[in-house]
Amino acid sequence: WNRLIDSAEGELGRHDFAGALNRIRSAEKIDGSFAYLQFIKGRILMELGRYEEAGKAFLMAKEEDIVPLRALETFNNAIRTLAERYQVPLADVEAAFRNVAPNGLPGNELFVDHVHPTIKGQQLIAWTVLNTAEENRILPFDPLRDELSREKAMAFLKEENDRVTPRYRAMGYWGVGRVFHWAGKYPEARTALLKAWDTVRDVAEIPLLLGDIEIIRRNPRQAMDYFQKAQEIGGEEVRTAYGMATAAIQLSEGERALGILNGIPPAERSPIRHLGLSGEALLLAGRTGEAVKNLEAAIQKAPEVRRFLFSLARAYVVKGDESYARKTFNKYAELSGLAEGDYGDFRRTTLDKFHVQGRNR
C-alpha cells in the first residue's frame, strides 16, 4: 500500500496522471479509507479535468481525516437542518465558497492553509453574511427586535440545556479535558477532567489523564491513586503501567518501578520510553551500570529528550564519570536554557539524593 502511494506521488510529480490514478486505484482496493490517499486521488482527478470526481475525493479526504480540524459534513448538514426547522436565516458560507471557486473546488485563492481564509475569502464571508441579513430584513438594526430575539434564544438555550443528561455533560468535559491535555494546558485540563470524573467512573482514560497531570504537578501519590483506578477499569493497560512506573520513580521506589515495567509485554513496549524509565528505575535501585547503559540507549534514539539527559547526567555523577556527567548536564542545560555554572549544584544534589558512598557503581 505504501509503495503504491509513493509511486502515485512520483507519477503525479512527473505529470503521468493516468499512471498515478492506476496506482491510487490499486491502493484503494487495499484500503481506501485513508484520508491522504483520497487527497492524492483528488489532485490527480483535478489534473485530469474530472472536477466532480475530484470534489468527491477531496470531500472524502476531509471526512476521513483522523484529526478533523475542518467542519465535517454532518456539522454543515445539522446547521442547515436546524436553520430550516426553526426558520433562522442561514448565511451558507460553505456553499458560497464552492460557488465562486474555480470548478467548485476551493483552493489557494480562498484559503491560506487548511482552515484560514485569504483576504478574498474573508471578504466573501462578510458579503455572504451581509447579503443574508439584508435579504431577510435583519438590517437596518432594530434594538427592540434584537432584545425580543435574545430573550427567545436564551429561553431556547435553557430548555435544550435542561435536557442534557449528567453523563452526557460529563462526557463533554472529558472531551474538553483531552483537548486541553493534548495542548499542554494542564490546569484547564485538570478542571474539566475532574468534572468528568465526578460522574463517569467507567472510562479509564479520565483517571489516566488526571494521573499524568499529577505527575507534572509532582504529586506522585495522588498520581498513583489515579493510575490504580485506571488499572481497575481496564482498557489502557500499557499507558497505565508507564504512568504507574513514572509515579514510582518520583516516589524513589526503583524496584517497584522495575517490577511494573517488566510486566509490560515486550511487543507492547514503547522503546524509548521503556529504556529511559527503566534506566531511571535502575539508578534508584542502585544498579548504576545498567542504568547508564539503558539511558545511553534512550538518548541515542532520542537525543533531545531533556528528562533522560538529566537522568543520564545523574547516573554519570553516581558512577563517578565526571567528564561525561558535565558534558551531558551541559547538553541538558543548553536545551533547557540553564547556565552551565549550575552543574556544581546539580552534582551536589545528586550526590546527596543517591548517597553515593557505598553504592554499587
Image (cartoon, helix red, strand yellow):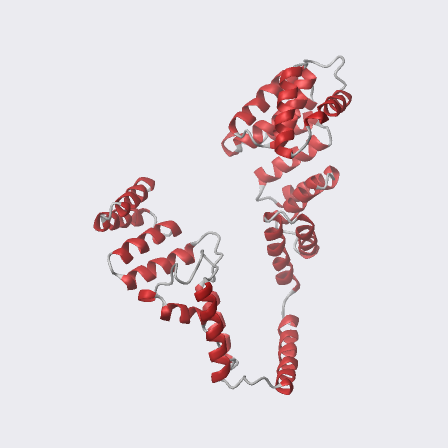
Residue at 48% from the left image edge and 52% from the top image edge: 67
User: What residue lies at 78% left-to-right and 22% top-to-bottom?
Assistant: 352
**Residue 93 falls in image quadrant:** bottom left
Q: Position of residue 162 (x, y in %)?
A: 66, 72
Query: Is 107 displayed left or right of 358 in the figure?
Result: left
Name the residue rendered at 64%, 44% in the picture. 208
Total marks placed: 0
Taking the image as drawn, is residue 50 in sight? yes
Whether 77 is drawn above or below 23: the answer is below
In depth, the one of 342 and 172 nearer the eye is: 342
Q: How far across and down, in percent of the image, does residue 171 sit?
A: 61, 58
Q: Quadrant of the N terminus?
A: top left
- Name the residue at 33% across, 51% down: 40
Q: Position of residue 119 (x, y in %)?
A: 46, 64
Judging depth in this view, the residue of 128 and 211 nearest the camera is 128
**Rendering coords of residue 339 (x, y %):** 69, 29
Above or below 208: residue 296: above
Q: Quadrant of residue 141?
A: bottom right
The one nearer the camera, 208 or 153, is 153
- State which quadrant residue 92 falls in: bottom left
Q: Please give left or right for residue 24 compared with residue 194 in the image.
A: left
Q: Is residue 258 visible?
A: no
Q: Does residue 131 appear left or right of residue 279 in this picture? A: left
Q: Is residue 194 left or right of residue 17?
A: right
